[in-house]
Amino acid sequence: MIMKNTVFRSLILSLAGLVVTAAVTLAQEASGVPQANRLAEQNLRPYWHVFAAYSLVIIMIGGWAISIARRLRAIEDRWVD
Amino acid sequence: MNHYLVQVWAILRKDLLLEIRSLERIGAMGAFAVLAGVLFNFSIDTTAVRPDDVATGLIWMTLIFGGLLGVGRTFQLEAQDGALQGILTSPAPKDAIFLGKTIANFVLLYVVSILVLGVFGLFFGLDLGQNLGWVVFVLGIGSLGFVAVGTLFAAVAAGTHLKETLLPVLVFPLMVPMVIYGVGAMMPLVNGRPITEVEGNVRMLGAFTLAAVAAGAVLFRYVVED
Amino acid sequence: MTTAGMRRGGTVLTVLGLAGLIVLYWMCFFWVSTEVNQGVVQRIFYVHVPAAWTSFLAIGFAAVASAMYLWLRDDRLDRAALCAIEGGLVFATLVLTTGPLWGKIAWGTYWTWEPRLTLTLLLWFIFFGYIMVRNSTEDPEKGKRFAAVVAIIGAMDIPFIHLSVVWFRSLHPEPVVAKPDGPTLPGDMLATLLFGVLVFSLLFFGFFLFRYAVEALRAEADLRARSAT
């Protein structure tokens, strides 16, 4: 049980980190970057997309896992009553 | 077999008679068709797009939207007066009820589709003289396929609290093949190409319609049982 | 299968799947070779395609379970369908989000009407429709039957949708720089792709078992609550 909590906490923290990174990436893209960075951006853009895609995999699968775990805990609590 | 057809005919006749007497649904669908044509006309930039290029597609979209209007009301009438229970407890097999309702809806939609064809031909300057028979035939197959799916899901929608608002969500994704094959078959025909060029599309449209009617007939009983 | 057994099975599959996911990520980032024409962005392919295949697996599974539910009226089959649909929704969403990320770089547009993406978009709505219908009836038994019908008809339509979209695309070809999923896929790319399919399937079934356990416990709790009153 304790192990589960630690696992969940670290999972949530890393997910949060990924989400923040992805959000910053997309915001940068949307808002537009200063001219000086534009060339560099163009070379690096595919990498951001790949990173975002692979992060999304973790976010979505992790998100589903957390959703199931929460429901499982809820039904177990109800079971105990 | 005869007995079965009699039952289908009974349901079909009832629905058509109701419709002829009140002209409610056909009136609404017909008005929708004409007015949709008007709005579409103003939504196209005729300097950038030739109207007869898009007319066929717009005809099918109007059929789908208008058909959804009509089909959504299929079970409304019975649900209101509790007549649905009456039909369901009758010894008529459920697939006969489905076929009767579907064919009644088909007649309605087909009449409207001919109207749409005429009105849009007028508004968008189509030359309907060529291949008219085949065009009308393709419209018929498409209408039947649409109505089969629509009637089945109308029964589903009637049993939910969302009612008709649920219909587009359920029906539209499944209509992609119908639109693709229907427009794919009709556009060349309207432009005067021979039927041999679009045979494949007509056949696929027919296959889709057949599958829709068969699936609807089989699955309808699971929707309406209580 | 008891709930405890399901959780054990789910744990095994999930742990295997997660381990596989780590290996897959390593393969995608460090092992597999870079595709010549598209460059590094093509690596999205290795999660995009397996997610698509998993969502199709989900609808197939759900349709079969739904058909058997309508025939046998065993609630367990309906529960299985629901869990599969939910999983399918997750993976379909993944396809629809990674697709534009790939497409923007590879083909210059966020969205393209290529067969796999189009089919997955419509599949997403079939999943969505299933869940909507299931939750929108007063009588839950009705909801289960309606949803089963949605799943069956949806699955039946998939081949038609695929054929029609492929035909449509043959008329309106959009420029594709390279064909990463042709039969001429190089060995290491094929291996990575197939491994991706395996990993996603493991994860799908692992989570499926946990989700199924939740539903089974819920049904049991409802039953006990009802018999207690």
Image: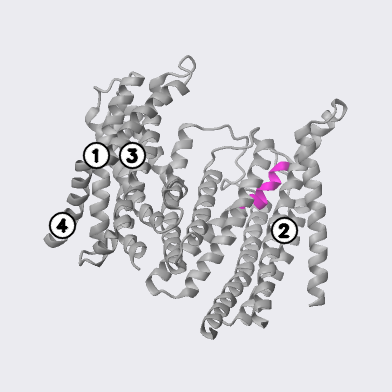
Using the image, name the chain to which the residue with label 2 belongs: C
Label 3 SS: helix
Q: Which residue is mark 4?
A: B5
Q: On screen, C147 above or below C34? A: below
Label 2 SS: helix
**Residue type at numbered disc 4:** Leu
Q: On screen, B125 above or below B27? A: above
Q: Which residue is mark 1?
A: B23
Q: Nearer the viewer, mark 4 or mark 3?
A: 4
Q: Residue at x 27, y 23 (%)?
A: B128
Residue A45 point in image, percent of width and height: 77, 37
Label 1 SS: loop
Q: Quadrant of the C terminus of chain B?
A: bottom left
Using the image, name the chain to which the residue with label 4 belongs: B
Q: Which residue is mark 2?
A: C24
Q: On screen, B197 above or below B51? A: below
Q: Which segment is the magenta one? A: C41-49
**Residue type at numbered disc 2:** Leu
- Mark 4 and mark 2 in contact (Cβ < 8 Å)? no
Q: Which residue is mark 3?
A: B200
B41 with respect to C51 (left or right): left
Q: Nearer the viewer, mark 4 or mark 1?
A: 1
Q: Earlier in the sequence, mark 4 or mark 3?
A: 4
Q: Residue at x 37, y 43 (%)?
A: B68
Q: Nearer the viewer, mark 2 or mark 1?
A: 1
